[in-house]
Image (spheres, rainbow, N blue to C red):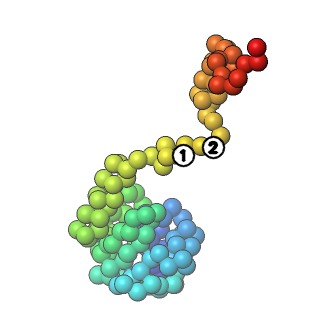
Amino acid sequence: MDKIRIDKWLWAARFYKTRSLATDEIGKGRVAINDQTVKASREVKVGDMVSARQGDVTRTVKVLGISDQRGAAPIAQALYEETTDSLQLREKISVQRRLSREPALSIEQGRPTKRNRRDLEKAKQVGWNDRWSASVDPD
């Protein structure tokens, strides 16, 4: 076996969980062979450079082996070798993700959380509505 369809190879190499997911990603233009976007029927051979985007990370690998069966992870990892540029980029993105702030923390308004609601109820019980007001008291 010298060549195999790219969707089948991506599934066998465990880049995607199912062949249909691999086909969908190829159809969206997220997979390239030798810097050319491809269709799912394109055949891949040993020595080709495949770049596949998974989420916000693009992995670039060199094809070392061909398989049409999905096996264990160590067997699947023997089918390709990731480039050093790809490894460095993944590490950089991982560090950025770890150091970045949680997006939900930037939301200042909106629906109160359960903790916020309990704090408001506790404040009302201690006479929050009976506090001094700046309004003029009629005497």
Hey, what amino acid is under mark 2? Gly
Rendered image quadrant of residue 24 = bottom right
Please identify the residue farthest to the right as the structure is shown.
138
Residue 100 percent coordinates (x, y): 37, 50
Depicted 75 relative to depicted 26: above or below? above
Circle 1 packing at 10 Å, graded few (<14), some (14-19), many (20+), is: few
Residue in the image at 64% along x and 28% along y: 117
Residue 35 as seen in the image, left or right of residue 135? left
> Disc 2 versus disc 1: distance between alpha carbons?
7 Å
User: Is there a contact, CB below 8 Å, between mark 2 and mark 1?
Assistant: yes
Circle 2 packing at 10 Å, graded few (<14), some (14-19), many (20+), is: few
Residue in the image at 34% along x and 59% along y: 93
Between residue 55 and residue 21, name the one nearer to us: 55
Residue 121 seen in the figure: no
Depicted 48 relative to depicted 94: above or below? below
Please identify the residue farthest to the left as the structure is shown.
84
Residue in the image at 63% along x and 43% along y: 110
Residue 129 percent coordinates (x, y): 69, 20
Residue at the spot of label 2: 110
Depicted 23 relative to depicted 113: above or below? below
Residue at the spot of label 1: 107
Q: Secondary structure at mark 1?
A: loop
Q: Secondary structure at mark 2?
A: loop
Between residue 88 and residue 60, name the one nearer to us: 88
